[in-house]
Amino acid sequence: MQQSVDKARSSAQRRGTLYVFLAAVLYSIGGLCIKVIPWNGMAINGGRNMVALLVVGGYLVLTHHRPRWNRWIALGAACVCGTNILFALANKMTTAANAIVLQFTAPIFVIVLSLLFWRKKPQKLDVTVCGVTLAGVICFFLESLEMGGMLGNILALISGLTYAGVFLLNDMPDSDPISSVFWGDVCSAVLGLPFLLQETDFTATTLTSLVILGAFQVGLAYTLMCEGLKTTPAVTASLVSGIEPVLNPILVAIFYHEMIGPLSFVGAVIVVGAVISYNVIRSRKVPAAAEKQ
């Protein structure tokens, strides 16, 4: 009986890991598609979320999950909406690599927000990783002084803050991640509609890229991630998700021929390396502490 239970759990974890991996791959196409679409960032975000709502709404119908609403879900939706908008705008104002890596600082903001609002004192590891990550972020801003893109870098960094809010609020009592995603997409679509109505370029490439963004990079990716995190260990999820900030700029470099400067590359290695290492070390410490109790 126990063997059967272990086999089922192992199968669920493998399936969950696959979902997280697929979500990370789908997230990574965002930079390229946003670069290809010749629209304002707000218009792109509004259009892709209109498409995404069809996917997320379909998932809710199939799973008989009625969208809920309370203060935690509302705050989570605001963070989802803010992250969507800021990431789209940042991609238009700085390189795709800068946008995704600076958003990848979300775990560091989780530490800071936990200290400010929940008085959760950071451990030595937390402080060390914050310091290392800050050094990586500085590399991006030093290079932007010479190459431009400062505003885009700032917006990307703020998107890391709102993304951290998504994680924190999803852990609150009576939260519901998929409902926050649904309402966040609704807000994004409504806010982007006035900008979308001003656009005039509706070529096949533009519309195809928009559908890919909405259906796959937002709708399906969010759905897969929500499902995958239910059974995927934290360390596995963090390592697998690390493919996004690596694959995103590679796709943009290959198909859009956008490269990043040497200092930004160093910053990317520092930030991604620090965040992944932090998640790995932290996840190993939790089981060790539990065994001692």
Image (cartoon, rainbow, N blue to C red):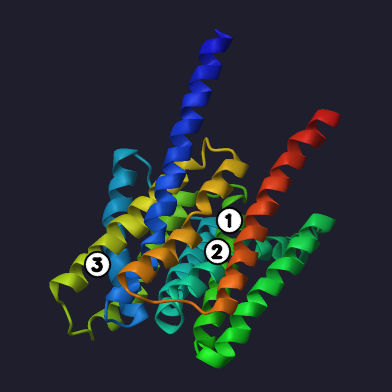
Q: Position of residue 286 (x, y in %)?
A: 75, 39
Which quadrant of the rendered structure holds the C terminus? top right
| Residue that appears at 28% across and 70% down | 47
In this view, which residue lies farthest toward the left? 204
Q: Mark 2 touching mark 3, by CB under 8 A?
A: no
> Split into 4 quadrants, where in the image is the N terminus?
top right
Measured in 3D between alpha carbons, the distance from the residue under mark 1 to the one under mark 3, in whole angstroms, is 28 Å
Q: Circle 3 sits on which residue? A: 209
Which label sits on residue 196?
none
Mark pair 2, 1: CA separation: 7 Å
> Tag 1: residue type?
Phe
From this viewpoint, which residue is outermost toward the top?
1
Nearest the eye: 167 or 107: 107
- Residue 96 is situated, as x and y percent measured from the top left of the image, at 44, 73
Say which of 111 and 61 sits in front. Answer: 111
| Disc 1 secondary structure class | helix
In percent of the image, x 52 and y 35: which residue is there?
231
Rendering coords of residue 58 (x, y %): 28, 47
**Dot 3 crowding, Cα within 10 Å, few <14, some 14–19, many 20+:** many
- Can see residue 17? yes
Q: Nearer the viewer, mark 2 or mark 3?
A: 3
Q: Residue at x 51, y 38 (%)?
A: 230
Name the residue carrying label 1.
Answer: 167
Instruction: Tell me the tag on residue 163.
Output: 2
Q: Is residue 293 visible?
A: no
